Image (spheres, coloured by chain):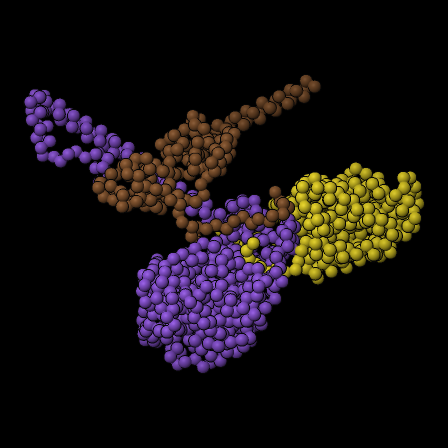
Chain colours: A brown, B yellow, C purple
Amino acid sequence: MLAALFVMTGIALVLGAALGCAAVYFKVEGNPLAEQIDAILPQTQCAQCGYPGCKPYAEAIASGEAEINLCTPGGDDGARKLAELLGREFKPRGAPAEKLKIVALIDEQTCIGCTLCIQACPVDAIIGSAKQMHTVVSCYCTGCELCLPPCPVDCIALIEEPRTPQNWRWKYPVTGLGVFT
Amino acid sequence: MSSPHIRRPASVQRVMMTVLVALLPGIVVYVWQAGAGILVNLAIATATALASEALMLRLRKRPLWIALSDGSAIVTAWLIALILPSIVPWWLTMTGVLVAIVGAKHLYGGIGQNPFNPAMAAYCAVIVAYPALMSQWPSIDGVDFATQLHLILGGSREIDGITGATALDAMRTGLRNQNDVRSILGSGTGTFGFAGGRGWEWIAAGYLAGGLFLLVRRVITWHLPFGFIAGMGLMAGVFWLAAPNNFPSPLFHFASGGTMLAAFFIVTDPVTGTSSPLGKFIFAAGAGIIAWVIRTFGIYPDGIAFAVLLMNICVPLINHATQPVPVGQRKDSRP
Amino acid sequence: MKARIFNPRGGVKPDSHKKESSESPIRHVPLPPRLAVLLIQGSQGSARTIVTVGDRVLKGQCIGEAEGADGTAIHAPTSGTVTEIGYYPMAHPSGLSSQAIVIEPDGEERWITYEPLDPATADRDELILRIQASGIVGMGGAVFPSHLKARSNIKTMIINGAECEPWITCDDRLMRERAANVVTGSAILALLTGARQTLIGIEDNKPEAIAAMRAAVRNMEPVTRKCPGAGKMNVVAVPTRYPTGERKQLIQVLTGVKIPPNERVTKYGTQCFNVATAHAVCRALLHGEPMVSRIVTVTGNVERPGNYEVLFGMSIADLLAFCGVKPDTTRVLMGGPMMGFALPSLDAPVIKGCNCLIAASNELFPPSAPEQPCIRCGDCVDVCPTGLQPFEMYWASRTKNLDSARRHHIFGCMECGCCAYVCPAHIPLVDYFRFARSEIRARDEEQKAADQARTRFEFRSLRLEREKSEKAARLAAKAAETRAKAAAGGNAALIADAVERARTQPPAQDNAEQDHQK
């Protein structure tokens, strides 16, 4: 009995030491955590999480000061992936991820050329200069809505990108039988 | 539902029915050689399989009719009945079928999802649990139907004088006792026929005929039966040529035990097998080799069930290694 | 000459059902009350409208310019007045709408005049430009712009008259009745692509078409004999098998070259054109007629099945009504039964890729039996012409394991439907593949957009940082200067300085604004 205990304890100690050494000597220089988190975030740079962009939010999660479910565009899917990466418990976000891409559109008749939206855009997707009409480069726009509040004449609207045969998606086949779940 | 809008008249039900039809020649020969007791076992197994399948579908809240009518449970049931000794008590057949349907099939998610061949899993379970009953094979023409019925349904088991060693058993025991193959075969106990076990070689021929029917109907491809026979034949052949006195010939192995049933009806189970032609060959050949090893060096009457289960474990690995490449694409290119 | 045939793997042999529509000659359809020509003719490019409501147009007049490199021009199918530019349903499985130019015919059918081009003397670029301007696209259903394909330099050109899908006979009738034009068009394409050999592949269930095409090749006009590939033009009967009409399949059957799913056919010195495309090229170059109509097979549950010469823009409902569609029709398929789709709306106008319309009833096309679990029987692997493992792709797609689906070469799938055709478990495999592929594409797009946004955000942060530090440096320098001045001349000098500055400079602008003007 005693011998068995000693043997088991001995094995545990030796293996524990070996694992500890391995952790120190064979340390894998992977991506720093913040970068891995940043890769999951949707990069809308919308700041709805309360941080000024996706990267700052990723850093806040990595340092443990932010919850993982603050990202609105990422939705539950994103939160689930973060939970998986970090080994934390998944917390539902509520609103699901928006599927159709949304882009800002400036009503060029109304725009007074105040440049306030240009300063607000986190991805430099609005071009124009003072007293000149501005326009959104829609392929760069992430639909973050940050340009809406600063606009003094409310000339910016968010519109859904139109459905075309190119971005139309086939649906998951429905068997309607319940053979699988 | 999008294209295609036309479909070939094919169904799982049709596939399974073809398999059942292909088993008929073997069963007919079985009845002719070893008496009608096997029919009782088949009936018990079928009833148990359908009842347990229905129960499991009910518990899993799945539509009953589609899965019940596909015939897969009956195929499993028939295979179990055919691989058990024909005079096992009724509850042993039932136990085997329950293990197959409930344990090996539905607990893994039903048809198409099970990693292990249900019939083989059942065989292994009962042979480990009831080794004595599983070794009581009736001698080929010494038991009339009434006795068989009594043994199957009745309680008392007076089996002295009606059971005999199977060809594989007799061969193994003889070799353990330092006899050579020729003298064992010639010992004239009524166990051996011209190729394998007396009478059993004809049943094997019946299975072979049914298997050829399956090949013609393209229900199975040649890779599996050929691989199994080739794997077993290769091992048996090499050792037989090296030491003909200590190892029986490939023909003996083909005609004894469940070789033919396994080659055409058991390793050909698509669900638990591999997919590519090369993979199929490797899978079946592996099963044949392991079966020969267990027959030759193991203690069980026949090693096929263990061999098939062992190869079932290797299926993901074989599939991974034998992934075919699209037409024209080189092996090393990535999608 | 007996040509060598290479048998590819897989494929199926469904009932052909060609006789229903192949036995009567091509018929014309009366001019409908209006024609709605869609700006998007296929899923590739689109056109930009160059007419306005009220314009009078002539037949063949360009009404929509090609947009982008892979767009195609569209032309007025008849003479008349543009009455509307509005949204019409597209003949596409999505049921989406697209802009269409609606023309009310004046009944005169007056053609605009384009000068014919002589392929023997005209410049190659000129010929290709004419093909583009005539709005010619692949007529087999893929609707890929033909001028892009004509630009390639190849050794062997394949003309696709296989028509392997059941029910469809429009190419069959075209080859029987207009073989000379098809052969001439093929010769022109051979000239453009520099092909030294032209193989015309026709399935052996169309003996009349093969005979007509062979006769046409023998009696080829001398003008086209000058084309390099024209001298070695061969009509080859290929075994009837679906999907031999797919271009890589046909190339393999005729030349033995196996082209991987992810590679272009031109890399292997081949290119494939449909017979109807060759016919359209001939009409466009030698007769100055742009694409305004095509031959459509209307068959299935109709009173008068057959092939009809239909103007683009005619409503599919009108066409079916003309052919006498029977009342128990449940849905209408566009394309063949193997790869076609059920039209979401019959108001969709006929487009360039519309080769066949099948009125389907429950007798002709019984609804599929319920889906059962896959038993890995491997029938799908046996029939897959590309050598894929459809059931593995199915497991991956069903569980939405998109990476695994990609690893199993889901993008090599041509959606021919052989696997679903033979599946004993009645699994709609192609549906699963389409779903998985559009999900993977969408995900890749999203990933690309996210990467781009990340780079732009990081660049912007960097720039703001830099500007901040530059501004700080500037202010520090100025402060130092001011201090130096104050030390030198006292406050009075500073005040005079400020007044001077205020007079000469315009009102100070917002710093950020200046930043943006930089």
Q: Can residue C310 be seen in this snapshot?
A: yes
Query: Does residue B55 sit above or below B27 in this rendering?
Result: above
Where does residue B266 sit, x and y in percent of width and height? Answer: 72, 50
Query: Does residue A21 sit above or below B154 in this rendering?
Result: above
Query: Does residue C503 sit above or below B334 in this rendering?
Result: above
**Which one is nearer the viewer's eye here, C122 or B303?**
C122
Q: Can residue B171 be seen in this snapshot?
A: no
Q: Could you tell me which quadrant the N terminus of chain B lies in?
A: bottom right
Residue at the image position 78 percent from the left and 52 percent from the top: B253
Q: In the visual, does B82 lie left or right of C157?
A: right
**Which one is nearer the viewer's eye here, B24 or B203?**
B24
**Which one is nearer the viewer's eye here, C361 or B293?**
C361
Residue at the image position 55 percent from the left and 66 percent from the top: C325
**Which one is nearer the viewer's eye here, B40 or B271?**
B40
Q: In the visual, does A24 lie left or right of A46?
A: right
Give the number of marks: 0
Residue at the image position 61 percent from the left and 66 percent from the top: C15
Where does residue B114 sit, x and y in percent of width and height? Answer: 67, 44
Where does residue C164 sit, x and y in percent of width and height? Answer: 54, 66
- The image quarter containing residue B294 is top right
Where does residue C401 sit, x and y in percent of width and height? Answer: 54, 44
Residue furthest to the top in view is A2
Residue at the image position 85 percent from the left and 49 percent from the top: B40
Q: In the visual, does B211 lie left or right of C365?
A: right
